[in-house]
Amino acid sequence: MAVSTFLGLETALRGILAQQRAIDITGHNIANASTPGYSRQTANLVTTQPYVDTPSGLLGTGVDVQSYQRIRDSYIDVQLRAQTMLKGYAEAQQSGLSQVELSLNEPSDTGLSSLLSQYWAAWQNVANAPEDVATRQALAQSAASLANGFNSLSSQITTVQTQTTQEQSLTMDQVNSIGTQIASLTGSIKAAELA
């Protein structure tokens, strides 16, 4: 079978169209040069299937764009994700501990340290004058204040724990929602590629 006269023109046309798509990617890269988080793209060119029915063997038929690829360092991407995760963990821990620190309210005149000091001082006064009713009442009052302080602190820390649990739940819901969106987008991309 003879090779068509237009095979050379068709090969040249394929080459021109492939290079045009590569130039389009270059224009896209230039347009997004100052976009935060953007990474360059490149067109991967491959040879097309050769023409087999020639007396001398295979005859090349040109080039085509096989795929588009982002120019990224996968090692750096993995490190960035890992460090971002650690940063998020540290920020969440700092937030929770800051709330606990506010609950402890130390050093202050109304914190647990002050209440414990008053409690032990009341015990010392009772030890010095065990028969005095006023010092025993002061000890009882000091013990009640200390118990109220512990109850208040327990309530505040329970509130912090509840808020943290709710934030975790909301974050997981967001992650699941984003995962669903990615799966949907992946399906759309595959359908578009098949079309």
Image (cartoon, rainbow, N blue to C red):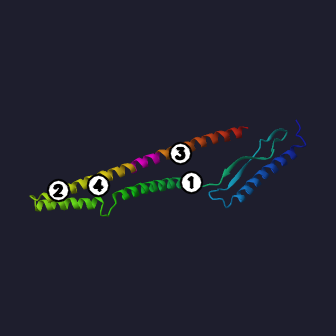
**Sequence order check: which comes first, mark 3 or mark 4?**
4
Q: Which residue is mark 1?
A: 77
Q: Is residue 38 above or below residue 172?
A: below
Quadrant for the N terminus, please: top right
**Sequence order check: which comes first, mark 2 or mark 1?**
1
**Closer mark to the observer between disc 3 and disc 1:** 3
Q: Which residue is mark 2?
A: 137
Q: Is residue 83 left or right of residue 34?
A: left
Mark 1 vs mark 4, CA separation in Å: 49 Å
Q: Give the numbered dot on residue 175.
A: 3
Q: What SS does tag 4 mark?
A: helix
Mark 3 vs mark 4, CA separation in Å: 39 Å
Say which residue appears at 18% left-offset and 58% top-offset.
Answer: 138
Is disc 2 surrounded by few (<14), some (14 to 19) or many (20+) residues within 10 Å? Answer: few
Mark 3 vs mark 1, CA separation in Å: 19 Å
Mark 2 vs mark 3, CA separation in Å: 57 Å
Q: What SS does tag 3 mark?
A: helix
Q: Main secondary structure of the magenta part?
A: helix
Say which residue appears at 43% left-offset and 56% top-offset.
Answer: 95
